[in-house]
Image: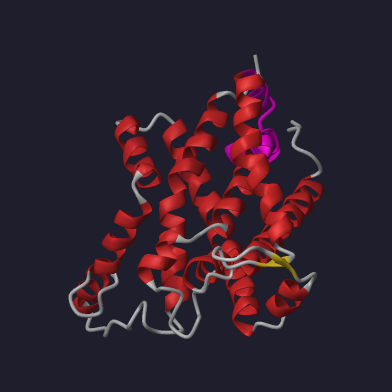
Amino acid sequence: MVAPALLHAALWIGLPVVAAVFLAFTSYDVLSAPKFVGLDNFRDMFGDAVFRKSILNTVVYTFFTVPFGMALGLLLALGLNAGLRARGVFRTAIFLPQVTATVAIALVWLWIYNPRNGLFTTLLSIFGVESPAWLASTTWAMPSVILVGIWQGIGMKMLIYLAALQNLPKELYEAASVDGASKVRQFLSLTLPLLKPATFFVLITSMITAFQSFDQIYILTDGGPANSTTMMTYEIYKSAFREFRVGYACAQSLVLFVLLMAFTLVNRRMMGGTRGQA
């Protein structure tokens, strides 16, 4: 019964992963046969100031988009779970950016960030504040990209938290109310611990999404200005499809995989497993 799925995974996931690991230790430009170079790709990579900068940018982007997005998603889920009127409309509106093409979203935000006639420029001009060059400034480019990442990812986080909240046992809250526990106490002692499995899932998927961020960087900033918004995935793209250094790009991809695996294991250890406790 699982053979078709296993065959699909082996062909389209397993083989490419094995090929990428092999190519990471070769010099390969698509046109000629791979040439084994050992650890040269990794030496070049960690000696590359731009790639080191991309690692730092990716960590910074993840550090801000993931926790802020999770907090906002949880707050929205709590509001929608509280019997808000027309919550179906709000839920659809909040989730809509998640299913909208990232390129389309990035184009909309390009207009919002336009320093001449964009939405932010117009709003700031009402208060007599001059709008900065949001995407052309090394100071404002990364915060601008982070804002887009938070906004786009809230919908999925909200939906997962909302589904988890609706499945929490109501009898525990009734017992807590009888014992005189306040709403704040119920949230801290019941809701948060019971949401631990959902929180772990949201955390890991959000981190993976943040580390793989590419589309909005490509459209909004092209990694600039001065590499202030270049990400690991963007550097992998440039190495493979602009410079045709496929072996080098595979080595970069392997480093990205190792970082994601390490962060996943650390988060699992910090959360003490995924089983919620009341």
Taking the image as shown, residue 108 lies to the left or right of residue 228, namely left
Q: Residue at x 46, y 72 (%)?
A: 143
Q: Residue 47: x, y in percent?
A: 71, 83
Q: Residue at x 26, y 83 (%)?
A: 129
Q: Is 103 in front, or is 82?
A: 103
Q: Which residue is drawn at 66% across and 30% down?
A: 180
Q: Is 164 drawn above or below residue 251 in the view shown?
A: above
Q: Residue at x 82, y 48 (%)?
A: 269
Taking the image as shown, residue 186 lies to the left or right of residue 149, namely right
Q: Is 178 in front, or is 278?
A: 278
- Assign the N terminus to one quadrant of the image: top right
The answer to which image quadrant residue 12 occupies is top right
Q: Is 144 in front, or is 163?
A: 144
Q: Is 172 in front, or is 15?
A: 15
For residue 96, say whether it is visible.
yes
The residue lying furthest to the top in this view is 1
Q: Residue 114: x, y in percent?
A: 25, 74
The answer to which image quadrant residue 235 occupies is bottom right
For residue 200, say whether it is visible.
no
- Assign the C terminus to one quadrant of the image: top right
Q: Is 232 drawn above or below residue 181 in the view shown?
A: below
Taking the image as shown, residue 113 lies to the left or right of residue 183, namely left
Q: Residue 173: x, y in percent?
A: 63, 25
Count up the numbered dots.
0
Which residue range is magenta in the image?
171-197
The residue lying furthest to the front in this view is 32
* Residue 202, magenta (yes or no): no
The answer to which image quadrant residue 32 occupies is bottom right
Instruction: State the scheme by which the image is colored.
Output: secondary structure
Q: Residue 60: x, y in percent?
A: 59, 70
Q: Name the dominant secondary structure of the magenta segment.
A: helix
